[in-house]
Amino acid sequence: MRNKLFAILAASGLLGVSLLFLGAARDKIERSKPDIKVDPTPVTDGRAPAIASYADVLEGIRPAVVSVYSTKIVREQVPQIFRDMFGNVQGREQRLSGLGSGVIISANGYILTNNHVVEEAEELKVLLNDDRELIAKVIGTDPKTDIAIIKIDAGNLPAATLSDSDKLRVGDVVFAIGNPLGVGQTVTMGIVSAKSRRVGILDEVAGYEDFIQTDAAINRGNSGGALIDTKGRVVGINSAIISNNQGSIGIGFAIPINLARSILTSLVETGTVTRGYLGVSTEPLDTSWQEALSLKPDVKGVVVTQINPANGPAAKAGIKREDVITAIDGKAIATRDDLRFLIAQTPPGTKVKIAYLRDGKPLTTEATLGQLEEGNGSDGELLPGVSVSLLNDDIRRELRIEDDINGLVITSITPQSRYTEVFPVGAVILQINRVPVKDLTAAKGAIRPNARNMAYIYYRGVYRYLFFAARG
């Protein structure tokens, strides 16, 4: 299945890392709030009249869907054996171009698109419906939902109206608008095939999936484009497909606009995304748990197996181990993903009402959510595409690293990362810019953005220095 999953990329293979080098330019952008239009009414009043054409509906939204062109520079891979023999050998540079789509969501130039459309790009250009081509800057990105916000310096732009994607129903007619394969703006028609799909496309970044599935044709270049309802409102951002031939076979996925809107608001206002945190570990309520807790087979929920930390939001709300969480703010919780997604999309500091079972009795409580820390200080992503972990006994035994060596070990590097030619997997980073690396937080704090950095590493019995550039 994995080899059949792929994101519809702006450039063939432009997955991997964030646009760190645009951080300096981003800071100079005036963070004026976009004037977003929202129409929350249902798409029909319960009756479905026959319609011969949707041209009038689409005429108003098409100018708000744009093409996004990206350019990046990559280096050819150098085999590990040559790097071991000759040191930090650099491969030849190659310039790649990519294509995606975007949706203008405010008249002052904010554009909603996919993270994978813009990540790692050296330059971004936006082609408007009136054939104007403008340079775009990245306001913020969120790889965990594959959302990005970019901005162009223009005014009085045609802006899309956003709908309430929670009111979508399976069977609703939808349209996908974008620039597939570079042929020009194209509209395809289909229906909502399913809601709340989780297919593992964002697993590598521990992402949050809640896709709208549609059979409206989506192809390369459609990423970041709009999924439209029959009132001409945006209900989703086209993101990915499942296919066995890299072309549309009627299984496409779009990010619900409600989720995208919450992410873009945070990115525009702060440049980052904050997520809620409850502080529980859970397991599925399977038949074994139902029997152990004397619950009926039709009961749905998740079993709390651990409260962490001891003074966290769940603990303060009185939640205990073996409680069964069944709903948050009235929304049913049937799986661990349901709970994780709902809590993460709720802002920190929000009070949520938790419905749960204890000894088979229904109870409710309120919890004030904390803020989820994406990294726990010991493992995570140090640089775009470079995952690290704090040395522990298991890693020391596996890599034969002595006890007196301490730091962060590089556990993996994605093929798309610009650092594949810099760091070897299995190396232990001891210092960055002469600052000892005690944990991930310290390591990130030692990196100088938009500058040349020096890492002191231990690899295969040898201490050495490596130099790398960090963009931020």
Image (cartoon, rainbow, N blue to C red):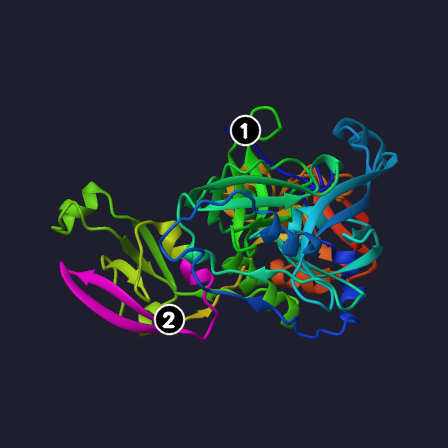
Q: How many marks?
A: 2
Badge 2 or badge 1: first in the primary sequence: 1
Residue 306 found in image quarter: bottom left
Q: Is residue 2 magenta?
A: no
Q: Which residue sits at x=85%, y=32%?
A: 86
Query: Is the residue 117 above or below the residue 93 in the image?
Result: below
Q: Is residue 363 magenta?
A: yes
Q: Please give the residue where the numbered disc 2 appears in the rendered image.
A: 313
**Where does residue 191 sit, x and y in percent of width and height?**
47, 41
Q: Pick whichever, 163 or 440, lies toward us.
A: 163
Circle 2 or circle 1, nearest the eye: 1
Q: Pick whichever, 156 or 127, lies toward us.
A: 156
Q: CA distance from mark 2 to mark 1?
A: 45 Å
Which amino acid does the dot numbered 1 rest on? Ile
**Where does residue 407 sit, x and y in percent of width and height?**
63, 53
Residue 406 visible in rendering: no
**Range covered by the magenta-colored residues:** 341-367
Q: Outermost residue toward the top?
A: 245
The 10 Å Cα crowd at callout 2, few under 14, some 14 to 19, many 20 or more, is: many
Q: Which mark is residue 249?
A: 1
Q: Which residue sits at x=66%, y=70%?
A: 34
**Where does residue 361 sit, x and y in percent of width and height?**
13, 63
The 10 Å Cα crowd at callout 1, few under 14, some 14 to 19, many 20 or more, is: some
**Where does residue 284 sit, x and y in percent of width and height?**
29, 47
Q: Which residue sits at x=26%, y=58%?
A: 326
Q: Which mark is residue 124?
A: none
Q: Pick whichever, 379 or 155, lies toward us.
A: 155
